[in-house]
Amino acid sequence: MDKLDLKGKWNELKGKVKQEYAELTDDDLKYEEGKDDELLGRLQQKLGKAREEVVDWLKGLG
């Protein structure tokens, strides 16, 4: 599963992400509707994780 339902709850998730990874900036966490792939790519690069790991991690936060 590589799709997320971020619409409407990204602000809440973003706070949780920042608590766990304080080094991530607002630019790293910028989300625009329909651009999930860009967000996931930035997180993959910054965290050094595979796409599936990032998706699973975000789902676990939600």
Image (tube, grey):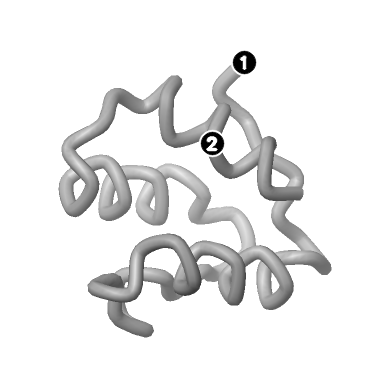
Quadrant position of residue 1: top right
Q: Which element type, helix, strand or loop, lies under badge 2?
A: helix
- Above or below for 59 versus 23: above
**Residue in the picture at 75% in, 45% down:** 5
Q: Disc 2, disc 1: CB below 8 Å?
A: no
- Above or below for 16 versus 62: below
**Residue in the picture at 54% in, 69% down:** 32
Q: Position of residue 51 (x, y in %)?
A: 36, 27
**Amino acid type for the residue under numbered disc 2:** Trp
Q: Which residue is mark 2?
A: 57
Q: Residues within 10 Å of mark 1 (few under 14, many from 20)?
A: few
Spatial CA span between label 2 and label 1: 12 Å
**Amino acid type for the residue under numbered disc 1:** Met
Q: Residues within 10 Å of mark 2 (few under 14, many from 20)?
A: few
What mark, if any, has residue 1 been given in the picture? 1
Q: Is 37 or 12 nearer to us in this picture?
A: 12
Q: Position of residue 10 (x, y in %)?
A: 68, 67
